[in-house]
Image (cartoon, rainbow, N blue to C red):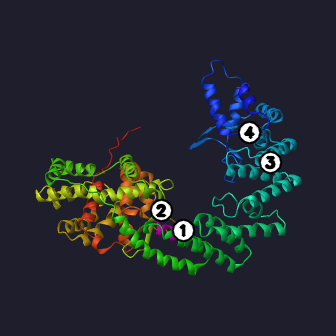
Amino acid sequence: MILYFEGIDKTPAGLLDERVIYSNMLSFLKNLSEPVSSALLAEKTAFEFLENYTGKPSIWGTYYQPQIYQKDGDKVFQSPDISLLTEELLAYWASRAKTVGHPVLKARYSGLICDFTLTVTGRKPDISIVKLCIASLIAVFEQGLTGSRTARNHKISRALKLALTYNQQSEIKKIKELILTADQQIPTTEEKNIWASSFDLLLNKKSAIVFANEEKSIIDLLEKRLENLWQADPWATKAAAERLADYYQKKTLRSDVKRVLDKLSQSFEIYIKKVPAIQVAGHLQELMLIYKYFQLNNEAESLMVRIRSVSKNADEEFKKIVVSQDIQTSELDGYANKILKYDGEVMYQRIVHAQMMTTAEVEEDLERVIRSNPIRFFLTTSIVDKKGRVLARINPYSKDKDGHLINHYYRFLQMNGAILLHFVFEVGIRDNKITLESLMNFLRLSCIIEEDRHSMIEAGVKAFFDQNYLVCIHLLIPQFEEAIRNLLEANGGNILTYNDSAYPVKTFNHVVDDVIVREAFGKDQVYYFKMLFTDPRGWNLRNQVAHGLLEPELFNQQTAQRLMHAFLCLGMIRWKEVPVTVD
């Protein structure tokens, strides 16, 4: 392994990736037949730590962070483990920092000393090692020894942070000049956002470290980029416009804030002419939120009106994506008869289980759809009502997996699930197996439906059999919510909150997600309830009905049948017999 380091630690220094070093080290150790020496273990540990590029302290309050950090109650699993660092290990790294030649290696070893000395020894690191780290990071930036401009910027940002922390004025001056020069050398037509370091690192700080002429130079350069990019790329334009708007906002130059954001708006207008309505609504919403953030409320309101209009078209486009399946009536009858094979309690239990999916099954089906039609999962989509009002937003799959999962579950039940459930009820009622009497007898077995609610629930169930779905849905949803609260309260859970000297009940969304409810129904059924009743990305029945948002035509047989299935889930809950012991 030492020969490996000798091979990369050469002059002139070449590109070096610390993660590649770590990977090569693991391969070497895997094939090593002899015991691992303390020196080799120290080398492995040095490259285990990940650099934290967020600008915020890691979980340890340091620059370097663990590859894995998991917490389960009071137990913490972390790799590497900061608690295993010793003064001997730091001394080894300090020695390596002074003897190696490659700036990337020097920066790694000395950086670890700067980061962990206080934690291990209770003392600040020696200033000589801090200066060595800063000088090494500067060399990495100047010589371009990392694989990308972004990685170089991270290195110089780290150098600046250390120089400011330890008040190294000469290093601060040199770093500032390097950053300013580097940004000025990037053409103002460059669309990749690799040119904002001078603003982000030097100007956009609580205490700016630039002189007035340098500040003007940074802003003038951003203005040139804005002017040269707005017709070419909206994302590059956004990077410049948001920084300029933030600067002018702090200077209370409101007209300039509006000017640069209007330029961004023009850039988006060019772009959205080329994309489907589904994408247009998302881009306009992004623009609206930017105007709103900078308190340009008139412009934000205008965009909201436009979003509603565009969202109607987007919804129509989305509805064109349909699944075509040829299912024979005889097959559906066979499916229904299989479920309805038994009578009474067993039959209703079979209906519950037949129409339940596990979250794993939903996820598997979603992944199948993604493989066949991946494009729309890269987009931000909005769920809109008939009037074009945005009810919920689902970000791209990479950022909002749960949103896509909930929405897919809802759409699956509306199509495939609705057909199967419909035939179960249709055949069961036709053959006099599902009746008002037998269904109510099943629900009366539930320990979470109070006796004084039976008549009200029966009125809702009767409305279902009479095909009066408007009455059925309005009556039964509040009773479902009350039953879940009963479950929580009966098991010692809290259903109240505190607000202004009063104790209102918790919202349905909070109650249904309680650990007691999850233990009673299981996580898959709770996920089903949330999709059906409270999540705006799903069916959201409870909130839609409570707030008058459910369209009149949706008070229909399909919605009522799905609600009846949820009520059958309540009928599954019984008191658990606990043996009494006598001391």
How many angstroms separate mark 1 from mark 4 (CA)? Answer: 42 Å
Which residue is identified by label 3? 138
Q: Main secondary structure of the magenta part?
A: helix
**Type of amino acid under label 4:** Gly
Few, some or many residues within 10 Å of mark 4 (<14, 14–19, 20+):
some
476 or 157: nearer the viewer = 157
For label 1, count other residues whose C-alpha is less than 10 Å away and answer few (under 14), some (14-19) or many (20+). some
Q: Identify the residue at horizontal 66%, vertical 53% (top origin).
A: 54
Which residue is labeled 1 in the image? 286
Query: Label 4, on which residue?
Result: 14
Q: Distance from label 4 to label 2 (Cα)?
A: 41 Å
Looking at the image, is mark 1 or mark 4 nearer the viewer?
4
Q: Are marks 2 and 3 in contact (CB under 8 Å)?
A: no
Spatial CA distance of label 2 from label 1 is 10 Å
Q: Is residue 456 magenta?
A: no
Disc 3 secondary structure class? helix
Q: Are marks 1 and 4 in contact (CB under 8 Å)?
A: no
Residue 380: give its label.
Answer: 2
- Whether residue 500 can be seen here: no
- Residue 281 on the magenta segment: yes
Viewport quadrant of the C terminus: top left
Mark with earlier residue (4, 3):
4
Q: Earlier in the sequence, mark 1 or mark 4?
A: 4
Residue 376, how many percent across, how many down? 43, 58
**Part of the protein shown in magenta:** 279-285
| Amino acid type of the residue tagged 2 in the rendering | Thr
Residue 174: image tag:
none
Q: Give the Cα separation between the discs numbered 2 and 3.
A: 40 Å
Circle nearer the viewer, 3 or 1: 3
In the rendered image, which quarter is residue 455 located in?
Answer: bottom left
> Separation of disc 3 and disc 1 at Cα?
37 Å
